[in-house]
Amino acid sequence: MMRDRLLRNWDFQRALRLVFALVFLAAAITNQEPVAYAAAAFFGMQAVFNIGCCGAACAPRTERSATKGPARKEITYEEIR
């Protein structure tokens, strides 16, 4: 039950961020690199809190927009002479 709640809204980008965080964390531990620790923290926070880049174009999809497509409206044309 708890596992279902934890993995409910994980898409490909979020899982990829988690993989990057784990790779950078392994590199930081083995090489003692402070920059790798910072990168691991950055990607880890993005994965845990599901945040992407700062722009609105990278906002996560909501349930409503993911399930409902755009409303199609019939277009009517008038001929002007």
Image: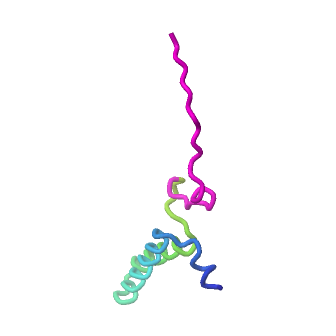
Name the residue: 50% across, 58% down. 58
Taking 20 as reference, is 44 left or right?
A: right
In percent of width and height, residue 74 lies at: 57, 35
**68 lies above or below 1:** above
Which is more toward the observer, 19 or 11?
11
Quarter where residue 25 is shown: bottom left
Question: Which quadrant of the figure contains the N terminus?
Answer: bottom right
Quarter where residue 21 is shown: bottom left
Name the residue: 55% across, 61% down. 60
Q: Residue furthest right?
A: 1
**39 lies above or below 59:** below
Q: Which residues are magenta?
A: 57-81
**29 lies above or below 55:** below
Name the residue: 53% across, 73% down. 10
Which is more toward the observer, 41 or 22?
22
Name the residue: 54% across, 66% down. 51
Residue 72 highlighted magenta (yes or no) = yes
Which is more toward the observer, 28 or 46?
46
Q: Residue furthest left?
A: 31
